[in-house]
Image (cartoon, coloured by chain):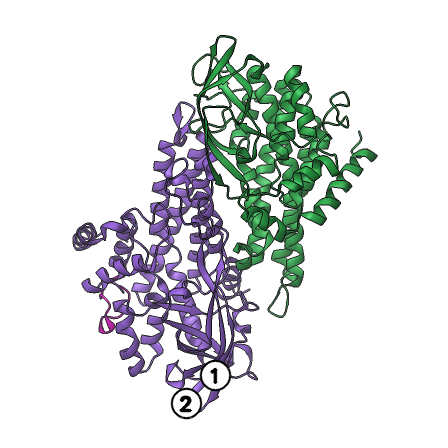
Chain colours: A green, B purple
Amino acid sequence: MDFTYTETQDMLRDTLARFLADTYDFETRKKMIDSAEGRDPGIWRALANDLGILSAPFSEAQGGLGGGALENMIMMEELGKVIAIEPYLQTVVIGGGALKAAGGALADAVIPEIIAGNAIIAFAYAEPQGRYDLANLRTTAKKDGAGYVLNGHKGVVYAAPWATHLLVTARTGGNQRDRDGVELFLVDAKSAGITRRDYPTVDGSRASEIYFENVALPAEALLPGGIDLVEKVVDEAAVAVCGEACGVTRKLHEGTLDYSKQRQQFGQPIGRFQVLQHRMADMFLEVEQIMSMTLMATLKLDLPAAERKAMVSLAKAKVSRSAKFVGQNAIQTHGGIGITQELAIGHYFKRATMIESQFGSADWHLDRYEQLTLPGAA
Amino acid sequence: MNLEFSPEEIAFREEVRTFIAENYPKELRGKQDEGGDLTKEDFLSWHKVLAKKGWVAPAWPVEYGGTGWTATQRYIWSEETARADCIRLMPFGLTMVGPVIYTFGTPEQKARFLPRILSGEDWWCQGYSEPGSGSDLASLRTKAVRDGDHYVVNGQKTWTTMAQHADWGFFLVRTDPDAKQQQGISFLLVDMKTPGIEVRPIITLGGEHEVNEVWLEDVRVPVENRVYEENKGWTCAKFLLAHERTGIAGVAASKRGVERIKSIAMSELDGDRPLLANPFFRRKVAELEMDLTALEYTELRTLAGEAAGKGPGPESSLLKIKGSEIQQRITELTLEAAGHYGAPYFRGFGEGDNEHPIGPEYANRAAPIYFNTRKTTIYGGSNEIQRNIIAKMVLGL
């Protein structure tokens, strides 16, 4: 049993944390969000080129530092601490993860572009009718000669306005909710037949509705692996989001603690009131459990699918619930000022709220866990 | 003991339903349900319809323009207006300063202000909270110094809802700096156009401009605009806070909210069934209805007590606590139902609303409304303060 990070992992964290401390204060973040593009592309270039850390979870053969899920968790936690809007989750964890798992010529071509900061990947998997069911797809990729023709509508695709590539789930066969026939494609975002409607998201990012109309895909666009690959990639994404929650909720708790020491009411700091002390103690318990569950799930990502899914679901369900508890109580303890745009705390709360349901709500994950592990169901 | 409405009450309910169906402004229909921005004109158009009918201030005594309705009739009124999704009128004139003026004001003040509250000519705001005085309201520092026939007011108020539209504000100010906290406070009516007043917007998490900071610099307020005695303003404030709490349960509006969740969850798909058939979601809706029913019958018992001559006592804190928590759970569940489409954000500042919704219409504002509704457990005396009141005043601890 060992829960210590390696020296390299500590260095990765320190490097990123120092960089973000210099570049990602709350006001700067706000300016990025309010800008036309909704981000500062210089940050991404610096992560790739100056820090060279977009390579962290890739193997040395792929030009990476030889890390994996733990490195992703470290990155996500630090990005969460500043509620960064960088497309690391979409590009490196999801896009990079899918390419790593699928291998082949496409992976060899695109992974170096990710590492160099040239490729940004958005994950177009959700559909308006599908909620969190990854196989509930109307988007189709019909065989056409050697390649495919893509048609459909994907909803709320985070980072799509910035993307060079779209990672798209689509059906090559089967009915709307069949597992068989679901495939994953990497699509050039500039392909003819793609239209986007871009918009900001409540947690400060940008996303799009994407419409594919007879988009011609070459045969190589398919990343072999079917629904099993999609589920693996989404489990890795869910755990990465748990990692982000570690950073986000840690900051929510710290911010609340600080505020309770400064804010005076009835002639004393409000942190002296026992009811608030107990609340902040409870928040602390939840933050620690978020950390525990995230580490647990991160270390179990390589288990066989059934076991991996069960443990990822427990982790994500717990993190969803805890993130809600920590976020809501952070706002309540701040009072009115917590609901203003002015203070950072509200923006952490918004991100924590979106994390709750990203890649499956607590209910969805508990349901999946029950179906996989508990006897007695019909 | 009897839970049924009498034949007269049923007839009254029919009258109310017919009136709403025939008179609620068409352009406002559905607007509140969709969570759209309500303008001053929206509020006023419904206000004026009610003023003309004489129903704008159901709880006021008849001599000042009230309806003379019984508590049950008022309950029916709030049920029916919520059922029809009628805009909830701003409380600052009608349920806050109005009752203070007819209870504590001079005959001149009553004659001057009450008719204009009823007609909607004056839009009121509330100058209570200060940056350093939230839950601890009595520590307020905005001061008013007597200068001949005027008070000269200096200080800063915050969380002043809809002050950007206000013609008048009622302010708590310190008139005796040496007295013990509650004892040196006076209740002033301030013309918001007086030189020295500056209203600055506070933008809240969903992007709304509802609340403001109000800065007061050498603002001259005629002494005749003081309600009740100098340094006795806390009496008015306490009276008003108790009034604010009885309305705050929001049972009728929450019932409407639960119905809306059900209809959303019937249209939102979860695999091959509606979301409302999902056992987890379904259970949460049932639990919400359970708690809302408990709140409703608690409020009815309180109303019955009021009808029997018992004023709203510290028990009304119960209504505030449970009512606000239920309001929050409704927004939570609506956001949950929205799924992925809770994430799109429509309202950048100055950009105006997008023309078309992204995803289903109800999802559009689900997240901003959820964020914004965190306020209900904070305002009107935070729920922590309400629990203190129950512990002290009800339980004697």
Q: Amino acid at mark 2?
A: Asp
Residue pointed to by mark 2: B149
* Segment tinted magenta in the rendering: B58-71
Q: Residues within 10 Å of mark 2 (few under 14, many from 20)?
A: few
> In the displayed structure, does residue A279 sit left or right of residue A66?
left
SS at circle 2? loop
The foreground one among A154 and B71 is A154
* Disc 1 chain ID: B
Residue A373 visible, this angle: no
The foreground one among B165 and B265 is B165
Where is A178 relative to B389, above or below? above
Q: Amino acid at mark 1?
A: Val
Q: Main secondary structure of the magenta part?
A: loop
Task: Please tell me the numbered disc located at residue A110.
Answer: none
Residue drawn at x 27%, y 52% is: B81
Task: Please tell me the numbered disc located at residue B152.
Answer: 1
